[in-house]
Amino acid sequence: MTTLKKVLKLRTVVSTSAGMALATSCYLAGLQVATIMVGELAWISILVAGFFCLLSSMCFSELTSLYPTAAGIKLFIQSAFNEKAAIAIGAFYVLLGISMVGAESYLLSSVLSGTFTMVNANIDKFIWMLFFIVFVACINYRGIFITGLVQDILTYIMLGFLVIVSIYTFSTQDIAMSAALQSTQFTLANVLKAAGVGVFLYVGFEWVTPLAEETTDYKLIGRGMMIAIGILSIVYSMFVVAMYTGLTKEQLVSGTPIPHIVFARNLFGTPGVIFFIFMSILASVTSFNAGLLNTSRFAYAMARDNVLPKVFSKLHPDYATPWVSILALLVFAIIISFFILITHQYLFIIVMAAALECIIYVVMAVCVIRLRKKQPDAERSFKIPFGNLIPIITIVVFTGLALGLFADVSRDYSGKVLFHNYWVALVMFAFAIATTLYTLFVVPVFKNKAAELAKTRQKRRPGRQA
Amino acid sequence: MAAKEEILEALADYQVQCNNNARLRRMQRDWSKLIHFLSEDTGDYFTMDVKNGEIMSYESGASGTPDIIVTTLSENLCDMFWGDLNPSQKYLDGEIKVKATQEDIMRLDAITMIIWPDV
C-alpha cells in the first residue's frame, strides 16, 4: 500500500472545518441567539447547539469513514436510498447553501459602507456586494487556492482575536449574570429556540469531509470536526456574551446588521473598527471562497454525471477551472444578494440556513442507520458507539429544532416582529419541490440522451467494438 | 478482470492520446504529478509520471511517492485508459476511489473529458 506525498494534518482539518463556519453573518446570528435568550446567558444555547452539532458530526464521521470521498453527501444518500433522492437532496442543499452568500455579502457590504462613504448607503452597499462576490468568483475562475497553511494561519488568527477581545471585554465590563438568571426569558423553551438559531453558528463545519481524500487516516476528519465544533463553541460563547455586554440598549434595539463593528467602536474606537473590518473581510472571503469552490466543483461533477446540462462541465482552457459553473453561481449569488439588498431580510437567510442544516443533519443520521442495515460488514474506521442511539437522538433533536424554527417568529431586540418563520418553511418547500421535479422530469432526459449517445459510440478498447 | 498486459496496452494508448492533444497539454501545462493506479481485484500497481501535462512514462508497479492514488477494478482502469468510461460517473458512484486534492481529482477527470468529450 503506497501513501501520498502530501497529507493533511489534524491542524489543517480543524482550521478548515472551523474556518468554513466562521463568517461575518455569525456575529448577527450570535446576537439573534442573545435576543431570544437573556443576552448574558446566550452561551448556554450556543453550547447546546454545539453539543447537538457534535452528535451530527459523529454521523458525518461514520459516513466519511465508510465513503472517504469528495462525492460525500451525494454518495451517502445514494447508497442509503437511491440516486434520485441523492440528486434531489444534494441539489436542494447546494442551492440553498449558496444563497447564504446573499446574507454574507449584504452584511459585509454593510460593514464596509458603514465605514467608508462613496455615494450613499444603498449604492455603496450594492457596489461593495458586487465587488466582494465578483472578487471571490475571480479567485475561483483563476484557480487560486487557499493552501492548508494559509487556512491554518487565517483561522487561528481569527479565533485568537475573538478570544482576546472577549477576555478584554470581560475584564472591563460588568456582566449581570445573577440578574440574567432571574429573568423570565430564561426558560428551557427559549434555550432550545435559541439553540435552533445557534446551529447557524456552526454551518459549514461538515464541508471538511471532502478532505478525507487528502488524509491517510480517515478518523482525522471526524476528530477534526469535533475539535473544530468544540473550539467554535467556546469562542462563540465568549464572544457573543462579550459583544452583547459591550453594546448599549439603544444599539441593541436599533437592529444594526453590524453589531460587531458597533461593539468594536464602543470598546476600542477607530483602531478596533479597522481590526474588525479586516477580520470580517477575512472571514467572509475565506468562507465564501470555500463555498464557491465546493459548489462549482459539485456542479461540474453533476454535469459530468449528466444531471446538469453538459455546459456546466466546461473547463477553462488555461486554468482548468469549471468557469461556466462558477459564472452561473456568481449570477445566482448576485441575484440573491440583490434580493437581500432590496428587502433587508438577511435574517431570513440565516434562519433558512439554520433550518437547512437541521434537515441535512437528520438526513445524515438516517443514512447512518440505513447503511448499517444495508452494509453491516462494510469497513468503517469509525463507528458511533451505543448502536443507533446517537443517530436516533440526532434525528429527534434536529427534527425538533427545525420544526421549532418554522413555528417561531423572528423578532428584533425590541420585540418587533420581522417575519413569521413559516415563510422560511414555504420557501424551502418550494425549493424542495423544484429540485424534486427537476430530478424526476429533467434529469432522465439528460441521462437518456447520454445513454443513446453511448450506444452509438464506437468502443475503443480492442475486442469491445461491438 | 483485465490482465496487467491489457492495462499496459491501454496505458500506451492513453499516453499517445494525452500527449498529442494540444488543448489538454495547454490546460495541464503546469500540472506535474506522480500517479499510482491500483487495480483492487488483481492487486497490480501502475505508476504514471506526468510532467507539465505530458505523460513522460508509465510502468507496472508502484515506484516513488505518489501525489495521487487511484483505486478501482482492473476493468474500470482498462476502460478508463481506452476512453470508454466516464471516470466522474464511476467516482460519484464510489466505484473509483481517489486519494488526492480536489483540484487533482478534477484535473485527472479533465484528461478524459478533453480527449473524449462524448464519453
Image (cartoon, grey):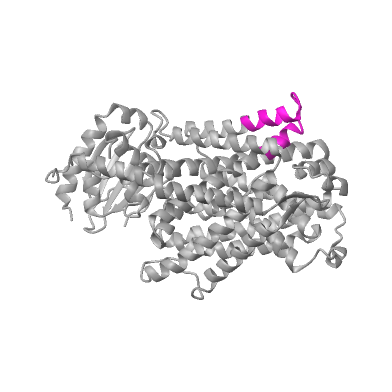
Q: Pinpoint residue A203: horizontal percent, then vertical percent.
A: 60, 52
Looking at the image, residue A53 sits to the left or right of residue A304; the answer is right
Which image quarter: residue A52?
Answer: bottom right
Nearest the viewer among A114 and A175 is A114
Magenta stretch, main secondary structure class:
helix
Q: Is residue B111 magenta?
A: no
Q: Residue furthest bottom?
A: A386
Task: Look at 87% across and 60% down and name the residue there.
Answer: A176
Nearest the viewer among A163 and A121 is A121
Task: Look at 25% across and 31% down and name the residue there.
Answer: B19
Q: Is residue A124 magenta?
A: yes
Q: Residue furthest top?
A: A119
As drawn, A154 above or below B44: above
Nearest the viewer among B91 and A163 is B91
Q: Pinpoint residue A329: horizontal percent, then vertical percent.
A: 52, 37
The magenta region covers A106-130
As drawn, A291 above or below A80: above
For the C terminus of chain A, the image quarter is top left
Looking at the image, residue A187 sits to the left or right of residue A321; the answer is right
Looking at the image, residue A292 sits to the left or right of residue A464; the answer is right
As drawn, A225 above or below A117: below
For the N terminus of chain A, the image quarter is bottom left
